[in-house]
Amino acid sequence: VNEAFAPQVLSVQRELGIDLDRLNVNGGAIALGHPLAASGARITAHLAYELKRRNVRYGIGSACIGGGQGIALLFENVQ
């Protein structure tokens, strides 16, 4: 979850019942940064790296967009 504020990720975790061991395993935007015009690239690169490193099949990346919008992507590790 690409959070702008800590309560945001906590609310998403609670509402969706996501295991904390699987959520933002390397930190979110607060810890890693929120580079303007490059957050999508950062999220995608980190997700692809973690799928390979952990040898897991699926991963989801998400980001908020100004004005209450959002985007999500589902990756499949085919290796």
Image: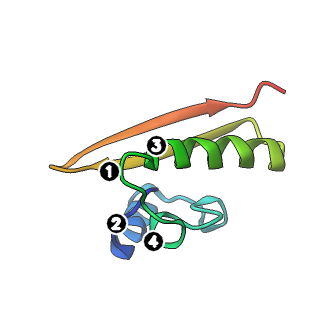
Q: Which residue is mark 1?
A: 64
Q: Residue at x 15, y 49 (%)?
A: 67
- Residue density around tag 2, few if under 14, some if 14–19, many if 20 or more, within 10 Å: some
Residue 16 appears left or right of 5: right
Q: Which residue is mark 3?
A: 40
Q: Which residue is mark 2?
A: 4
Are the residues tagged 3 and 4 within 8 Å (C-beta)? no
In x, y percent, where is residue 77? 74, 31
- Residue density around tag 1, few if under 14, some if 14–19, many if 20 or more, within 10 Å: some
Q: Secondary structure at mark 1?
A: strand
Q: Which residue is mark 4?
A: 30
Label 1 and label 4: CA atoms lie apart by: 13 Å
Q: Which one is earlier in the sequence, the residue at label 1 or at label 3? A: 3
Disc 3 marks which amino acid?
A: Gly
Tell me: residue 19, above or below residue 66.
Answer: below
Q: Which one is earlier in the sequence, the residue at label 1 or at label 4? A: 4
Q: Residue at x 64, y 59 (%)?
A: 22
Disc 2 marks which amino acid?
A: Ala
Q: Which one is earlier in the sequence, the residue at label 1 or at label 2? A: 2
Label 1 and label 3: CA atoms lie apart by: 10 Å
In x, y percent, where is residue 65? 27, 47
Q: Which one is earlier in the sequence, the residue at label 4 or at label 2? A: 2
Frontmost residue, 39 versus 3: 39
